[in-house]
Image (cartoon, coloured by chain):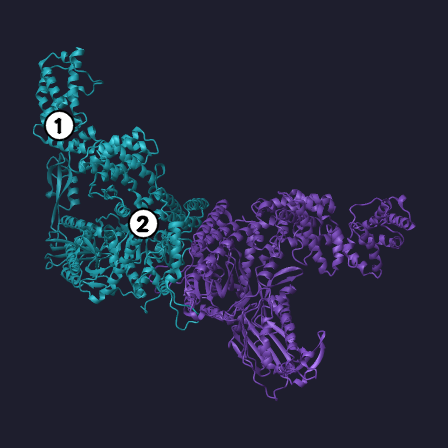
Chain colours: A cyan, B purple
């Protein structure tokens, strides 16, 4: 520890390190920024084609990270060291890792990982892809390939490194938290009477005071005024062409917004509006800045650098492979390795799936017979291995269509010049031309034979396309090829047997080398054939196959859990993710303070799973104070080396739990109910008021819905109380911090506040389902409150014209509608949505028109339609039912089920026509006729009428298709007789209208059940 | 140049340099600050007793320094490197000079000077004493001993060093301006594709845009709103005990104020109000911060450091000098040198004057006979040299009073125990007691003889007191002795012949060494006797005597001017100042671009004299493009060494002139009249409106004053036009920059705008006199406008209760009143101030009460009283006249003059009594009686009455004392007869009142001339 750099020396070391590499050293910005990214030296300089390599400290202010100085890692001010590398130097990860060495962090003694983190700053229209760099579980750096800023594409891409100096110092000095970081160390011979001070010495008061200011004191109205003034000045400056002054005000807007947010004064919709406004200004600033540089003709651009990589260079194929000897024409193993910077876990899974299909297709298209194909991968490599690949392509015969036969041969059957020309152009002898019947005529056809090329040449041609065909949810550019991939490709290896394939993609030339496990030396490993490749990686401890890695991890984790007499809680998704984050897994177990077990289980698990990708350990359903982390150190790592890694991980989880404990402690200083006033400051939507207003509406609506849901008096009471409290946790600090805990915390805090278990459960359940596949509420109050909440949102937002349009659904109304439908089905409750929406509309602070209400209802029905389609129900059946009773999802769902069975019946061909005859003859009538038995003339109509009366008397389940059709079924013979024997459209009005009335009565049997006219075959 | 450090390396070098010495390295602050001082790492950390040594960069924002990137030195953003040393390490100047060496500045090749600069930041209640450090005429560092911050005394004192990084880089890299500063230099082997960039490359756009924003675009109303919001938040935070958040808002207030100021939106009085508000907040913040540190028990305080230097240590006397041998008892030369850091020029003059008197008194008090005393000094040393000082004090006999004689001896004349005890206590034999008459009684007296002590012992005892007796206009503390002096004392040297005197003062122990000329090696020079001292310093080229230095400088300067066929413009004050700034003067001549000669002469001279202490060169009354600077290099400096120094000075003057040219160019883009609307935004005083409002009042008032001043029609026209334009130059950029040019620029711009010469002169003259001893207006319009301006200020500010109180006179009303009086006298114009003030009051936007008006008039009269007293007029004469006609200064002045002569007359003893008899008998009467000749009974009264009638008929100059007394003189015999022969106070009412009426009429002869009752002897 005495050898570790002090804080100020860390900074100076980094300055020197990056200056040596060529970076310009810059200074922190003069207004509060949340990150070094906001310094114009990043935000503006990354725009445009000019090179820009810069490094600087940025003391960054994030009001909502304030913890009153109590948390080891989290402070409202943290120190960043920011580096921008434009263009990508080709090996930024390696340069970065060397900088850690310069600081005294030996990568061989730590677990250093690149964990996917896609950075986005919506307030300034900026995003990029990259990673958090983890040092023993602690995020110490944000590493981003900048793709856009101010809504403008970054070209060339900038690499952004943001060191978290505080965390690095904590790790390096092995201290408990920021307070203990040694800031300076006075040299022994120093002449000045200065003490050694810690970061706590110099910054603790600021942490405490600013935290209190941001969380408790800042005057919301005044901050809103400031925001408005800043925004107005930004616009004024922009109008005057003053880019940088405008940018300063944008930064002030951003900081002020952050303070308002920390004060809990920003509602969900308001947030979007703020972001939209800031983004707009950011966009105009970026454009103006870029225009100015353009006007100056990009003065920092060397002529050489200006040259843009042409399309031709983007995907280029290497030197033509030499003709192979006959001897070598034996099949051989083929290997492709795409070496990348760390792929996100999800992208790895996707890439492997695509690669298998694509490789098979490529080989087929290339006419290369082959043995087994294996596709494997780790975060740093995608590998295709093919056994017994033919050394030479199969020969190919291709029929090429020529001129029509009558023009190809003259009357004598001799080939015309047209035929000769065609033959010549195809390289065949004219006598080999054939005549085929094709495309509705007779044509001359040449059989073109092409000889198979050697496999290496074919592969070199095909491999770039294979790689180019991979697609990712989000992909990024990084170098001047401007090719997009999940993460940068850094090396390519192709082997056909002993032969190294030469091709290039995205500016990378393939070579006969692979790379070792990160930070191991030597970095590059020569491989001479596929077998050597596999053995080399195995030697490195790299497990190429994901499944195998997962299994290894599971075993290790379970073993470590067993050692402390516990069981690991292994979620499948997490296991897959963790497996995709390492090449050479080694699980380590850490412990945490038992006191943290007092936190709610959901909190502990959320923190371990989501933040840290740790596996929790439990016993008899109760968590134990351990966690298991999976490192990339490989199983060969020596035990004593792991101390540092475990210590680091334990530090992180302690900070995380202390943070959570801080929140829970703060939150439980008052009963849940006391948060209600604060909900009043949380805007739901401008025209619909605060979340508190919404809460009050939900409570009223629950009363209105009670009869439909047949709530007991007690249930209603519970529902009302739960409705009142259901959103209160939104303004608790724990939920502000981890939104995914909404509901869970509400339940927890409700119980702590002395609410009944029923109320607490209903609070929790009203959010269910939270995602596709999540469970529905178990309790009726949970159901009731959830319905009321969603119906209020749906009705309200449709009323103020904020219905989702296109792909945009900022309020998650699709999910809300699906929740309504799903929960009613799960609870098997019939429920009239129209009536419920009318009730909801009644409580809104604005008018809801009938049109809006119908649009809203149809929006929900559409969701059910999609749901039913996904379940494989016939679309016509769905249409028929939803048209008739879409307003009641549960009834409709059952009706669809029943009708699906009916239309599958053998006698459906009789049932439907019988009914459709009734409808067809009557559907265009403008009025409904009354049937008078005395006006019947024929037996057939009389019989039918009596049968109808019987049918009408049958007691049916409302909406039931079975009820309808089982009632209808006996009428069919009478219907058929009727139409066979009775002429309906007689001239006598009385007679005709009586008969039509009869048929109308039959048609009406389906009313409210199904619109049979929608069915196929009607 | 290729060897010079680039900008970023300058920073890194300074960081390393100060870190090595023990400084903590800090970061720039996250909100716009005008200087590193505002960073809480300075502003707050200098408070309290804890040690604090810190260094950091501060990119500082000064909106009004923006020059659109056009000026070589002046930018809205400049880079400071800030160092705080608390406590004073004892040799901060030397440490600082070494840091320049570390940067590659060889002090031996440059002229480095410490030029007095007393720093004050009224907005935060902070001040300190110190210097600008000049490198070849360029200010490169501000060096301050911090005395107060937030209104709190700094104890221990902090040394504040503020490097101007841009200027250092310009000097070091020898480039023309900030644009050309090399910011980075990419190492040859750098891996990143980065270019070398200049400060212009990275900052020019910002300079241009922010300048335009600050000067032209910023919305005044919105900025005022921001200010109000910040202030409110600062107060809110303070109420909540949040010191640092409050401080952030104070900084935002300060920056916002600066922007408003740059926009020209802040009036003089408004400025004071803003400062007052900010200072109040600053004071509360400082107190809160200090309280918090106190509460924490000053954790950074070592126990050892906590010990406060006791009074005893403050002034301590060295070891008692040994008894000297009889051989050595010969007189010897005595030398005292007080070695200091560079004294301000004025302080040096003051100190030398005091030292001469004080040394004489000390030697006399010490009974040390001596030869010639010489007192000499340079900025770094005060020297007292005494020839032939006696080696031993003269012996002394002292009479000590004992008990009363009757108690000392019994009836037998034998000494009582009282006498014996007294004799014993005085160390004399009882038989040696004498009896003396003293203090109105007879007492026993002992004759105590003390033998003279050796001179060294006496001097060692006395010297600390000698130094302590020196007084300065502003003095400062620097170390834990908390003794105040003009600047820190760093060494003390006392010699008596060969003997080194040992004493200490302010924590400094005297030693037998002096110090060399700055930056010369060796720093310390051993001296064995006074002669060696003088020869050592002479060898160094140091001229100890100020007069001699001045003469040397005059010769050098004249010679250099002659070389270019010109004459130096040598102002006496400047010569004295310059002489006091150097120890070893060497004048150098620089040149500047001829084009700058187009600037107004006043501007050029102001810049050269005031900013740079240069002597201008002229020929035939026109300036030549040269300047002469006086360096501290000494005449022995080699010529080739001077190139760098001349180059540096030329760089500075170019920047200064370009700055001035920028202003003049901007200002002359429109006629002077067009600035009037902007005057409307310049607040004069809240209740009295803008300066434009004031201008309009002046114009009206000029019309009202015209008759009194007997203006011709033409003069009135000129006066009105001049009045309209007289303040317009206040909002021109040149005057905003150099306030001392107000009036001069108005005249210049008026002529440029096509106004008549008379109008232009009147604009200039209305400010006259600008300082004590300055000239008065020559023209009547100049007089008229000046009077109107001052009377408007006086009346207005008295009307709104802003009369000066105590020492406070923020509006300079004393000077205004003196100007009114002085100008009327100079113009020899009689003028009724009461009437003029009434006219002024009429135009005010507020009511002026009669009481206020009289108070205002009396305030002006008081000024004249002081003036007359200073002129040596008898106070009673002044009183007498001013009581009677103080409202007309010119008449009053003449009257005083005349009366002074009268009271000096031999017959005054007759004149005054004659008059006083008349007054005494009547002054208590409540009414004035009418004289009726018929009621006289006696001749004496009849004669007196006729004499009176004759006297009353004499035509007299109004207010003339001669007129009055010459008229009165002939009445004296009649008066005396009257009182001898007539009984005034007879019982008969008619008779008595007639006689009293007669005497009243005589008394009244003095009305409006003099109140004779105020005269001595009355």
Residue A452 x/y as whole percent: 13, 51
Q: Which residue is mark 1?
A: A963
Q: Nearer the viewer, residue A735 or B418?
A: B418
Q: Chain of mark 1?
A: A
Distance between mark 2 and mark 1 Cα atoms:
54 Å
Q: Is residue A180 left or right of residue A591?
A: right
Please name which of the two marks, 2 or 1, marks the residue nearer to the observer: 2
Out of B836 and B772, give the one closest to the viewer: B836
In depth, the one of B274 and A878 nearer the eye is B274
Vertical relation: A165 (above or below) B884: below
- Looking at the image, the residue that sits furthest to the right is B939
Q: Which residue is mark 2?
A: A667
Secondary structure at numbered mark 1: helix
Does any portion of residue B738 appear in the rendered image? yes
Q: Which quarter of the figure is the C terminus of chain A placed in?
A: top left
Tell me where residue A772 appears, x and y as whole percent.
Answer: 21, 43
Question: Do marks 2 and 1 both belong to one polypeptide chain?
Answer: yes
**Picture coordinates of residue A270 (x, y %)?**
36, 42
Residue count near mark 1 (Cα–Cα under 10 Å), binned few <14, some 14–19, many ≥20: some
Which chain does tag 2 point to?
Answer: A
Q: Residue furthest top?
A: A988
Q: Residue furthest bottom?
A: B327
Q: Position of residue B322 (x, y in %)?
A: 56, 84
Residue beneath the point at 27% across and 58% down: A654
Quarter of the image with the N terminus of chain A in it:
bottom left
């Amino acid at each position: 520890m005495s050898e570790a750099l002090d804080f100020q020396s860390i900074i100076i070391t980094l300055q020197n390190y990056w200056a040596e590499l060529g970076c310009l050293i810059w200074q922190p910005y003069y207004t509060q920024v949340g990150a070094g990214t906001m310094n114009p030296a990043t935000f503006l300089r990354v725009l445009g084609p000019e090179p820009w390599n810069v490094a600087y400290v940025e003391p960054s202010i994030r009001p909502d990270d304030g913890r009153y100085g109590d948390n080891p890692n989290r402070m409202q001010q943290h120190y960043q060291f920011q580096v921008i590398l434009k263009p990508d130097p080709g090996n930024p990860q390696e340069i970065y890792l060397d900088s850690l060495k310069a600081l005294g962090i030996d990568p061989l003694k730590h677990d250093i990982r690149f964990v996917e983190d896609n950075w986005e700053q919506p307030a300034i229209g900026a995003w990029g892809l990259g990673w958090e760099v983890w040092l023993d579980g602690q995020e110490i750096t944000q590493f981003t390939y900048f793709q856009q800023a101010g809504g403008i594409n970054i070209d060339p891409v900038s690499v952004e490194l943001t060191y978290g100096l505080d965390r690095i110092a904590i790790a390096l000095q092995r201290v408990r938290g920021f307070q203990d970081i040694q800031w300076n160390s006075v040299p022994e011979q120093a002449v000045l009477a200065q003490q050694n001070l810690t970061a706590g010495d110099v910054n603790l008061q600021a942490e405490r005071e600013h935290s209190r200011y941001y969380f408790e004191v800042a005057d919301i109205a005044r901050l809103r005024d400031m925001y408005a003034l800043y925004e107005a000045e930004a616009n004024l400056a922009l109008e005057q062409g003053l880019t940088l002054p405008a940018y300063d005000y944008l930064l002030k807007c951003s900081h002020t917004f952050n303070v308002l947010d920390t004060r809990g004064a920003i509602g969900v919709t308001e947030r979007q509006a703020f972001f939209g406004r800031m983004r707009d200004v950011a966009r105009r600033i970026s454009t103006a800045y870029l225009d100015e540089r353009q006007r100056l003709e990009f003065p920092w651009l060397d002529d050489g650098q200006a040259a843009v990589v042409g399309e031709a260079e983007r995907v280029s194929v290497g030197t033509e492979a030499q003709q192979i000897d006959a001897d070598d024409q034996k099949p051989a193993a083929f290997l492709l390795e795409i070496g990348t910077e760390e792929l996100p876990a999800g992208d790895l899974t996707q890439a492997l799936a695509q690669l298998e299909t694509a490789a098979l297709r490529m080989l087929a298209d290339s006419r290369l017979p082959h043995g087994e194909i294996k596709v494997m991968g780790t975060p740093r490599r995608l590998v295709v291995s093919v056994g017994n690949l033919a050394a030479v392509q199969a020969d190919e015969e291709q029929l090429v269509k020529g001129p029509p036969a009558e023009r190809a041969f003259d009357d004598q059957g001799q080939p015309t010049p047209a035929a000769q020309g065609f033959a010549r152009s195809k390289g065949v002898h004219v006598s080999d031309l054939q005549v085929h019947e094709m495309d509705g005529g007779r044509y001359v056809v040449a059989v073109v034979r092409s000889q198979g090329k050697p496999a290496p040449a074919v592969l070199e041609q095909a491999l770039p396309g294979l790689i180019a065909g991979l697609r990712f949810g989000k992909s990024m550019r990084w170098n001047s090829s401007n090719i997009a991939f999940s993460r940068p490709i850094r090396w390519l290896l192709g082997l056909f047997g002993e032969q190294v394939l030469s091709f290039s993609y995205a500016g990378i030339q393939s070579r006969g080398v692979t790379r070792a496990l990160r930070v191991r030396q030597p970095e590059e490993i020569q491989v001479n054939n596929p077998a050597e490749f596999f053995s080399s990686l195995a030697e490195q401890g790299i497990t190429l196959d994901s499944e195998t890695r997962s299994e290894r991890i599971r075993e290790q984790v379970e073993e470590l859990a067993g050692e402390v007499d516990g069981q690991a809680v292994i979620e499948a998704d997490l296991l897959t993710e963790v497996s995709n984050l390492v090449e050479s897994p080694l699980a380590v177990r850490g412990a945490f303070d038992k006191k943290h077990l007092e936190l709610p289980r959901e909190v502990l698990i959320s923190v371990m799973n989501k933040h840290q990708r740790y596996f929790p350990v439990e016993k008899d359903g109760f968590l134990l104070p351990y966690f298991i982390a999976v490192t990339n150190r490989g199983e060969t790592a020596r035990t004593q080396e792991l101390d540092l890694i475990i210590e680091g991980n334990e530090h992180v989880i302690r900070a995380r739990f202390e943070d959570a404990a801080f929140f829970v402690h703060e939150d439980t200083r008052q009963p849940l109910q006391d948060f209600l006033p604060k909900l009043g400051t949380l805007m739901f939507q401008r025209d619909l008021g605060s979340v508190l207003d919404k809460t009050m509406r939900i409570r009223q609506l629950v009363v209105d819905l009670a009869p439909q849901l047949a709530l007991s008096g007690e249930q209603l009471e519970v529902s009302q109380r739960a409705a009142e409290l259901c959103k209160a946790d939104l303004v608790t600090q724990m939920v502000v911090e981890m939104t995914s805990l909404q509901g869970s915390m509400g339940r927890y805090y409700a119980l702590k506040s002395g609410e009944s278990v029923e109320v607490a459960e209903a609070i929790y359940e009203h959010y269910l389902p939270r995602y596709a596949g999540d469970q529905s509420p178990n309790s009726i109050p949970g159901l009731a409150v959830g319905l009321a909440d969603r119906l209020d949102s749906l009705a309200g937002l449709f009323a103020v014209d904020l219905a989702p349009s296109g792909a945009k659904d900022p309020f998650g109304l699709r999910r809300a509608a699906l929740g309504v439908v799903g929960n009613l089905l799960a609870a098997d409750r019939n429920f009239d949505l129209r009536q419920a929406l009318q009730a909801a509309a009644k409580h809104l602070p604005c008018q809801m028109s009938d049109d809006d209400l119908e649009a809203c209802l149809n929006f929900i029905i559409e969701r059910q339609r999609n749901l039913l389609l996904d379940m494989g129900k016939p679309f016509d059946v769905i249409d028929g039912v939803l048209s008739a009773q879409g307003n009641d999802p549960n009834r409709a769902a059952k009706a669809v089920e029943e009708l699906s069975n009916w239309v599958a019946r053998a006698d459906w061909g009789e049932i439907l026509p019988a009914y459709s005859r009734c409808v067809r003859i009557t559907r265009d009538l403008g009025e409904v006729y009354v049937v008078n038995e005395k006006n019947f003339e024929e037996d057939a109509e009389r019989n039918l009428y009596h049968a109808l009366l019987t049918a009408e008397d049958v007691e049916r389940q409302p909406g039931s298709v079975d009820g309808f059709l089982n009632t209808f079924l006996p009428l069919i013979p009478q219907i058929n007789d009727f139409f066979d024997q009775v002429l309906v459209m007689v001239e006598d009005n009385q007679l005709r209208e009586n008969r039509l009335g009869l048929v109308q009565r039959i048609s009406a049997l389906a009313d409210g059940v199904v619109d049979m006219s929608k069915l196929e075959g009607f």
